[in-house]
């Protein structure tokens, strides 16, 4: 399949909602980190906000406060909106319709599989994932590409040259919201590509475009998942979920969920940082 433009890709994703049974929206939340919609299941997407800081200057979500009971399929049409927040709501609505657990989806540790497959290789990462340091340890060469670079991240402008060198690339699902995915795929056409995160719709359309594997978040216990999002949990700390993989070929993944390992690393890092802060305060 030819790679569509960003807006055209969002239109194609929205059309996927027309292929599954429609159900009413049961609840919607636009959280500080994530946006969630509950219909067939709980669907999630990164909360993409206007760059303007003040809330009253940002584009509103149309019919906010009256979305419960409306059509999830209709709500997914917000994917084609020009509004940042509405695009997030539309993606979450789509995921609430299609990211329903299926037995044929693969479970296991996709990052451990990548370590086995690409140790010593040149790896790129679109978006600064919390497991960036883990990948850096086993990759031969590694760089993160970010719209807002931190530490040694590459800028968006410097990214294409690096992507052309890569053997593997890990891509955030946020690229579906900000229309950057088509350009990324063109620049790393020879690399193995993983799209990962709660925004990712587990649908073959993205595989047909050239992504090799999709790793998304699937709800297993709604109340635990919902509480995690509404209380501002980051993805490794989501409860009531499992990580599922849809790939263009069968993958023998090591057992386990990389988020468990990541959560332990985060706890250890935060514990060290907390001790250092306490020691500095006591000086």
Image: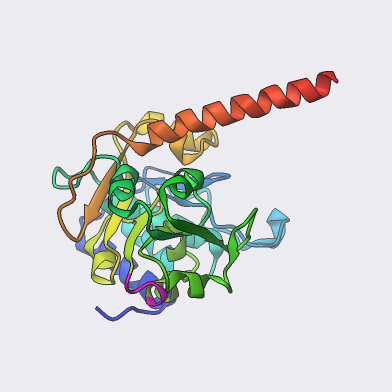
Is residue 113 visible to us here?
yes
Residue 55 among magenta residues: no
Report the front residue among 220 and 273.
273
Q: What colouring does the structure picture have?
A: rainbow
Q: Is residue 155 above or below residue 236?
A: below
Foreground pick, 99 / 151? 151
Marker count (numbered) = 0
Q: Is residue 150 left or right of residue 235?
A: right
Compared with 171, 131 (above or below) is: above
Q: Where is residue 188? Give x, y as percent.
A: 38, 72
Q: Position of residue 14 (x, y in %)?
A: 33, 66
Q: Does residue 126 appear in the picture of this structure?
A: no
Q: Residue at x 16, y 58 (%)?
A: 249
Q: Quadrant of the N terminus?
A: bottom left
Residue in the picture at 24% in, 35% down: 255
By secondary structure, the bulk of the magenta-drawn segment is best described as: loop
Q: Residue at x 31, y 50 (%)?
A: 114
Magenta-drawn segment:
186-190
Judging depth in this view, the residue of 276 and 107 nearest the camera is 276
Q: Farthest residue to the right: give it.
A: 283
Q: Which quarter of the rendered picture does the C terminus lie within?
A: top right
């Amino acid at each position: 399949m030819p790679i569509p433009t960003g807006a055209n890709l969002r239109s194609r994703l929205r059309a996927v909602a027309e292929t599954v049974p429609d159900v009413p929206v049961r609840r919607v939340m636009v959280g500080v980190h994530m946006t969630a919609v509950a219909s067939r299941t709980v669907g999630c997407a990164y909360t993409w906000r206007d760059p303007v800081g003040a809330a009253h200057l940002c584009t509103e979500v149309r019919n906010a406060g009256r979305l419960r009971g409306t059509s999830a399929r209709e709500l997914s049409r917000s994917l084609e909106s020009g509004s940042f927040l509405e695009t997030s709501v539309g993606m979450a609505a789509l995921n609430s319709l299609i990211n329903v657990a299926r037995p044929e989806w693969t479970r296991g540790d996709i990052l451990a599989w990548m370590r086995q497959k690409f140790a010593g290789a040149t790896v790129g990462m679109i978006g600064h994932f919390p497991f960036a340091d883990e990948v850096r340890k086993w990759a031969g060469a590694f760089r993160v590409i970010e719209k807002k670079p931190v530490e040694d991240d590459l800028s968006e402008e410097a990214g294409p040259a690096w992507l052309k060198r890569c053997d593997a690339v890990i891509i955030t699902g946020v690229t579906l919201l900000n229309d950057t995915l088509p350009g990324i795929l063109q620049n790393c056409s020879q690399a193995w590509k993983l799209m990962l995160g709660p925004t990712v719709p587990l649908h073959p359309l993205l595989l047909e475009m050239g992504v090799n594997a999709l790793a998304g978040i699937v709800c297993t216990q709604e109340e635990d998942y919902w509480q995690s999002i509404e209380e501002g949990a980051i993805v490794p700390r989501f409860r009531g979920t499992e990580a599922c993989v849809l790939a263009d070929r069968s993958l023998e993944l090591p057992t386990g969920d990389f988020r468990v390992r990541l959560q332990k690393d985060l706890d250890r890092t935060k514990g060290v940082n907390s001790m250092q802060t306490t020691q500095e305060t006591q000086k």
